Image: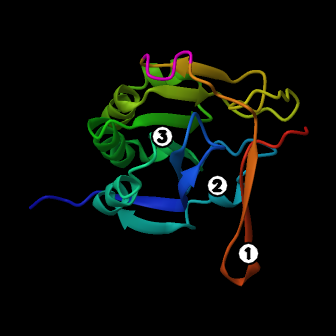
């Protein structure tokens, strides 16, 4: 009997231009042990929040956006759910979509990690925005929030791609709830 892989998600945006190059989907996972001071998504840090869904359902949601060129994984911390997210990333790459991962881990630590899920997720990604957020080292890069972070091109897909301008998006949902994504212009 095959076990169905699940993900604990915090949020999903079908279309955004604030979370990477071009029009893309964005998926935030729930849970992060890093707890960077000043995190943009502190509500996504706890492991008890979010909602559980299957990898199959997530893939279907992402593939239902035919006009998007890629997906961005953020959180929380994507590598805490690396095995399940690797299945999603592999499906996106098979469908011709790019994969960008925002992570608080440094790229070298991820490369040295022997966990098979971590290695599969790295192998299925095109670009990492890597490193812990440091409130004391702010910067205005389109995809990086502090100067200690780095972009790591794992494939040539996004090398030379237009990454900017730095932007934020705001949405007003049912009942007047406002959500924000992206990177504020002012520090």
Magenta span: 156-160
Magenta span dominant secondary structure: loop
Q: Marks 1 and 3: which is nearer the front?
A: 1
> Which of the two marks, 2 or 1, is nearer to us in this view?
1
Residue 79's label in the rendered image is: 3
Q: Quadrant of residue 69?
A: top left
Position of the C terminus by quadrant:
top right
Is 174 colored magenta in this rendering?
Answer: no
Secondary structure at badge 2 equals loop
Foreground: 55 or 118? 55
Identify the residue at image location x=34%, y=53%.
Answer: 63
Q: In terms of image quadrants, where is residue 86? A: top left
Q: Which residue is label 2 attached to? A: 45
Residue 29: tell me if it is visible: no
Disc 1 to disc 3, how far (Cα)? Answer: 29 Å
**Nearest to N terminus: mark 2 or mark 1:** 2
Q: Residue furthest left?
A: 1
Marks 1 and 3, the one that precedes in the sequence = 3
What residue is shown with label 1? 177
Q: Say whether disc 3 or disc 2 marks the residue closer to the N-terminus.
A: 2
From the top left corner, tell me how far across and down residue 143 is, in percent. 68, 32
């Amino acid at each position: 009997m095959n076990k169905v892989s699940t993900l604990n998600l915090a949020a999903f945006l079908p279309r955004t231009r604030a979370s990477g190059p071009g029009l893309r989907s964005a998926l935030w996972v729930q849970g992060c042990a890093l707890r960077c001071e000043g995190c943009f998504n502190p509500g996504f840090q706890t492991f008890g929040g979010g909602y559980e869904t299957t990898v199959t359902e997530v893939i279907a949601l992402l593939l239902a956006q035919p006009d998007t060129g890629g997906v961005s994984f953020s959180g929380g911390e994507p590598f805490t759910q690396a095995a399940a997210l690797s299945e999603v990333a592999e499906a996106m790459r098979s469908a011709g979509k790019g994969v960008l991962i925002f992570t608080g881990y440094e790229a070298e630590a991820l490369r040295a990690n022997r966990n098979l899920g971590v290695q599969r997720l790295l192998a299925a990604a095109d670009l990492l925005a890597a490193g812990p957020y440091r409130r004391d080292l702010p910067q205005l890069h389109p995809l990086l929030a502090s100067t200690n972070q780095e972009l790591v091109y794992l494939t040539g897909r996004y090398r030379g791609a237009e990454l900017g301008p730095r932007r934020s998006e705001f949405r007003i949902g049912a009942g007047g709830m406002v959500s924000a994504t992206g990177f504020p212009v002012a520090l």
